[in-house]
Every structure is written in structure tokens, then in C-alpha cells.
């Protein structure tokens, strides 16, 4: 891995974390983060949201909550954020004062330029217990495999796909009769606790990465 992940430095200053969210979908994870901020359980500010889909629900949600919300053209790529498109995203995130990038249902692979621009402070949520079921529709993969427990994972993003050091995981049982929809809904409920929890840990400034392991320093 050529890009180092977050090294804990920013939080040695007592700066409030400024989150920029990237998403492609409905934005329920961003909502959970906004709710945690509003409830005073997460010391951070969501300073902008960017979507790669012009009518993504996450943009409407952001606007309803007074968060500067932008569609930024990801062309010409279909599955990654690279080249000029990556530069456009970095420019908006910087203009908005972002120090921490939160991928919340962003359906693209982010590349080295974005990771370097934010010093490894880029997080993602994945709807399975990594390293099981990386990639798309992880809840369908879990059902097809026949596991009885799956879950969600919040991790630092590195240059792989769903491979970065793990911050928080929550287990979710697979129930008899589950469909893709019921299982995904149960995983999402767990996600809505896990993402604010991971961000609280990051905001505490005590996270340290040793190899693949993320630990808390006291
Ligand atoms: C979540 O299930 C997340 O794990 C996956 O995409 C979904 C996004 O949902 N990466 P939302 O847009 O936050 O509602």
C-alpha cells in the first residue's frame, strides 16, 4: 500500500472535525451522522455533501438540513473517481474546508489522489463483516453463501477495494426467511450506529494504526 492511512496527527490539535460526505444513494448513513451531531454525541460538522448522481436522495437530504450539497460530474469514468473528476471533487472538498471524507454509499472506487489530499482521513462503510463479502451487494452475497451472521464494517480507505484497516464492526444475525431487502434493512440499522461510533473514535484523536490493526491509545 503506497498511501499511508491516517496517522492521528490532526486531533492532537483540538479542532472540530469537518466532514465532507460522498454518496450516490439515499443518504441514510449521512442522516445518522447528522442526527448524532445534532444530538451532541458527535463533535463534528458536516460541511458538505457531494454526489456523483444528479438526483441522488443524499443531495436533497443535505439541502433539507442546510448542508451545502453539490452534484459533481464524475465523467468520464463509470466505476472510479480518477483524473480530472478526482481533481474536481478534491477542489470542492477543499473549498468547503473538509478535513475528513466520509464515503456513505458512494458507488465508486476512490484513488490515490483523494487519499493523499486528505492524509488518509477517508472512511467507508461496507454492509458486511470484512474481509467477508467485499464488493457489491454484500448482503446478497451473505444470503447466497448461507452465513448465519453478517454485519457492517467502518474502515479507513486504502488503495484496495474494501481492504483498509477496520475501525468498527457490528454483527447482524441472518434470520430464517430473510430476503435481500429485509437483511439489508437490518444491516442498515446497524450501520446507522456504527458510522457515528467510528467517527467519535476518530474525533477523539486516540486512534492509532499498527499494521492492519486500529487501536485506541489512552
Ligand atoms: C449502505 O448499505 C452502505 O453500506 C453501502 O451503501 C449503502 C448506502 O446507503 N456502501 P445510504 O445511502 O447511506 O442510505
Image: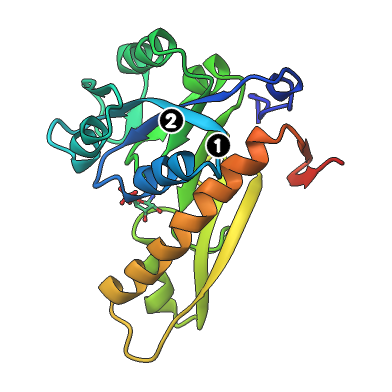
Front residue of 35 and 145: 35
Query: Is 194 above or below relative to 114?
Result: below
Of all residues, the one furthest to the bottom in this rendering is 176
Query: Is 203 above or below relative to 170?
Result: above
Q: Which mark is residue 157?
A: 1
Left or right, residue 8 beside residue 160: right
Query: Residue 74, image x and y in percent?
Result: 25, 23
Of all residues, the one furthest to the right in this rendering is 218
Quadrant in which the C terminus is drawn: top right
The residue labelled by disc 2 is: 110
Which of the 4 image quadrants contains residue 55? top left
Of all residues, the one furthest to the front in this rendering is 39
Res. 182 in view: yes
| Residue drawn at point x = 37 percent, y = 77 percent | 144
Query: Residue 7, image x and y in percent?
Result: 73, 26
Query: Residue 19, image x and y in percent?
Result: 47, 27
- Near mark 1 (Cα within 10 A), the count class, few <14, some 14-19 or many ≥20, is many
Amino acid at each position: 500500500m503506497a498511501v499511508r492511512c491516517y496517522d492521528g496527527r490532526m486531533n492532537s490539535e483540538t479542532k472540530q472535525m469537518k466532514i465532507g460526505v460522498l454518496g450516490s444513494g439515499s443518504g441514510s448513513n449521512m442522516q445518522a451522522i447528522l442526527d448524532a451531531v445534532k444530538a451532541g454525541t458527535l463533535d463534528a460538522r458536516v460541511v458538505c455533501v457531494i454526489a456523483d448522481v444528479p438526483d441522488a436522495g443524499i443531495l436533497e437530504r443535505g439541502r433539507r438540513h442546510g448542508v451545502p450539497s453539490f452534484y459533481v460530474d464524475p465523467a468520464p469514468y463509470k466505476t472510479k473517481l480518477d483524473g480530472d473528476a478526482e481533481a474536481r471533487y478534491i477542489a470542492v472538498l477543499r473549498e468547503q474546508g473538509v478535513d475528513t471524507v466520509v464515503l456513505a454509499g458512494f458507488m465508486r472506487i476512490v484513488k490515490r489522489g483523494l487519499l493523499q489530499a486528505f492524509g488518509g482521513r477517508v472512511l467507508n462503510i461496507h454492509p458486511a463483516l470484512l474481509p467477508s463479502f467485499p464488493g457489491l451487494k454484500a448482503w446478497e452475497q451473505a444470503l447466497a453463501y448461507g452465513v448465519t451472521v453478517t454485519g457492517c464494517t467502518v474502515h479507513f480507505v486504502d488503495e484496495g477495494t474494501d481492504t483498509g484497516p477496520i475501525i468498527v464492526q457490528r454483527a447482524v444475525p441472518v434470520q430464517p426467511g430473510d430476503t435481500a431487502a429485509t437483511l439489508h434493512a437490518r444491516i442498515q440499522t446497524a450501520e446507522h450506529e456504527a458510522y457515528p461510533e467510528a467517527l467519535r473514535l476518530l474525533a477523539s484523536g486516540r486512534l492509532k494504526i499498527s499494521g492492519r490493526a486500529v487501536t485506541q491509545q489512552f
